[in-house]
Amino acid sequence: MHQTLITSSSSRLGLGSWIVTSHAHMKKCNRCLTEKEDSCFPKDKERLYSLCKDCKNAAKREWYSNGGNKWESSYKKYVKDFKTEKYLLKKAQVRAKNKNIPIDITVDDIIIPECCPILGIKLFSGINIACDNSPTIDRIKPELGYVKGNIQVLSYRANMLKSNATIEELEKVLEHLKKIV
Ligand SMILES: [Zn+2]
């Protein structure tokens, strides 16, 4: 496949973008991660949308049912304002304040990888709701807080599984599960 990303930021977040393709007959949707024929993607001249038609429609429906208005312009603003490193920082700041834990990270310390470093699943946001693939900030040692060198971006799923467990606790869970499953 020969593809050039035009707006990689929104595509990484799973909210869709236009992609220039040439000679591609199959394409992977950024949201359902399924390989589909080109005809399953909205098309504008030579560009194919990064989400398949089904996913784009589902995203639209979610967007509207969550009170969003006028698809595209407002949703682009929404992506820009909220679903970014800045959004993760804002959430961390609120959590740090509520839990009274230290925070000294800036937006530059938040690096969202393409895939979750624990589960290997692609990171992208749900629309208005967290999904398993949503990027979240994990405190490596929870008690140290959101400080430089102590954070990593994980999928919501991995973060939920890890929660604030210690290595010892996780090992016990694993040992137990291995015994009974
Ligand atoms: Zn799809």
Image: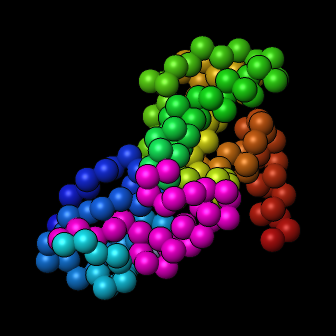
Colouring scheme applied when the structure was drawn: rainbow
Q: Does residue 127 show up? A: no
Q: Where is residue 46 shown, x and y percent of the image? A: 17, 71
Q: Quadrant of the C terminus?
A: bottom right
Q: How many marks?
A: 0
Residue visible at 68% across and 45% down in the picture: 159
Residue extending furthest left?
23
Q: Depth check: give the residue in front, 61 or 129.
A: 61
Residue visible at 35% across and 77% down in the picture: 41
Q: Quadrant of the N terminus?
A: bottom left
Work out whether 87 lies above or below 147.
below
> Which image quarter: residue 24?
bottom left
- Image-based side of 10 in relation to 27, left or right: right
Q: Depth check: give the residue in front, 178 or 61.
A: 61
Work out whether 176 lies above or below 140.
below
Q: Where is residue 15 shown, x and y percent of the image? A: 47, 58
Residue 6: within the magenta?
Answer: no
Q: Depth check: give the residue in front, 117 or 42.
A: 42
Which residues, given as a range, are shown in magenta?
Answer: 46-74
- Image-based side of 67 in relation to 52, left or right: right
- Image-based side of 162 in relation to 119, left or right: right
- Image-based side of 169 in relation to 20, left or right: right
Residue visible at 56% across and 19% down in the picture: 105
Work out whether 10 lies above or below 59.
above
> Which image quarter: residue 68?
bottom right
Q: Does residue 99 show up? A: yes
Residue visible at 51% across and 38% down in the picture: 81
> Which image quarter: residue 36?
bottom left
Q: Where is residue 175 shown, x and y percent of the image? A: 79, 55
